[in-house]
Image (cartoon, rainbow, N blue to C red):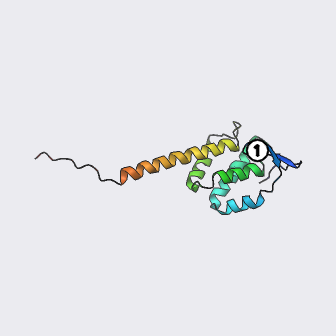
């Protein structure tokens, strides 16, 4: 995976676009990648490559780090399912980048959590007993 190299000593913050000092994200990226399954990381790299193909030079190390950091507390199946949706619906070709992808993943995680909560509440109780008319 190739990232855009910054030439100056300043770069834009991937979160807020403010100018900040250049920072080395490689140790953080390696650490966050080790906390994920290989399957999830490979799918994430494929999607980042798709975004870079559709919009050359848009994803740099800082944005990839932000993607990993923002989704670090979300389970792998939710991340993979959302990455697959992103690819199937060709969001990269429409000009949607890393920020959009993060929003999609967080939205899917929220839906997943609500679904699990609903299932937990409905499955933990006994079904109502129907009165018999003898």
Q: Residue at x 51, y 48 (%)?
A: 112
Q: Position of residue 99 (x, y in %)?
A: 68, 43
Image position, residue 17 (x, y; %): 76, 41
**Residue 10, above or below 37:** above
Q: Secondary structure at mark 1?
A: helix
Left of 107 or right of it: where is 7? right
Q: Nearer the viewer, residue 102 or 40?
A: 102
Task: Give percent across and percent down for residue 129.
Answer: 23, 50
Extreme residue in the top direction: 94
Q: Residue at x 41, y 53 (%)?
A: 120
Residue toward you, 131 or 91: 131
- Looking at the rendered structure, the number of numbered marks drawn on it comes to 1
Extreme residue toward the left, this view: 134
Q: Quadrant of residue 77?
A: bottom right
Q: Picture coordinates of residue 60 (x, y %)? A: 78, 49
- In the image, is residue 90 above or below residue 2? above
Q: Residue at x 60, y 51 (%)?
A: 79
Is residue 54 positioned above or below 3 on the image? above
| Number of other residues with Cα within 10 Å of mark 1, as a class: few under 14, some 14 to 19, many 20 or more | some
Side of 44 where 5 appears, left or right: right
Q: Quadrant of the N terminus?
A: bottom right
The residue wearing badge 1 is 53
């Amino acid at each position: 995976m190739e990232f855009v190299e910054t030439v100056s000593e300043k770069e834009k913050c991937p979160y807020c676009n403010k100018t900040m000092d250049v920072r080395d994200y490689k140790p953080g990226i390696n650490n966050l990648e080790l906390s994920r399954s290989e399957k999830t990381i490979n799918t994430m790299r494929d999607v980042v490559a798709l975004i870079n193909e559709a919009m050359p030079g848009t994803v740099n190390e800082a944005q990839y780090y932000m993607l990993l950091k923002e989704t670090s507390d979300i389970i792998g199946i939710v991340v993979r399912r959302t990455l697959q949706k992103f690819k199937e619906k060709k969001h990269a070709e429409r000009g949607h980048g890393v920020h959009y992808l993060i929003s999609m993943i967080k939205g899917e995680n929220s839906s997943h959590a609500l679904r699990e909560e609903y299932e937990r509440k409905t499955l933990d109780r006994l079904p109502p007993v129907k009165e018999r008319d003898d």
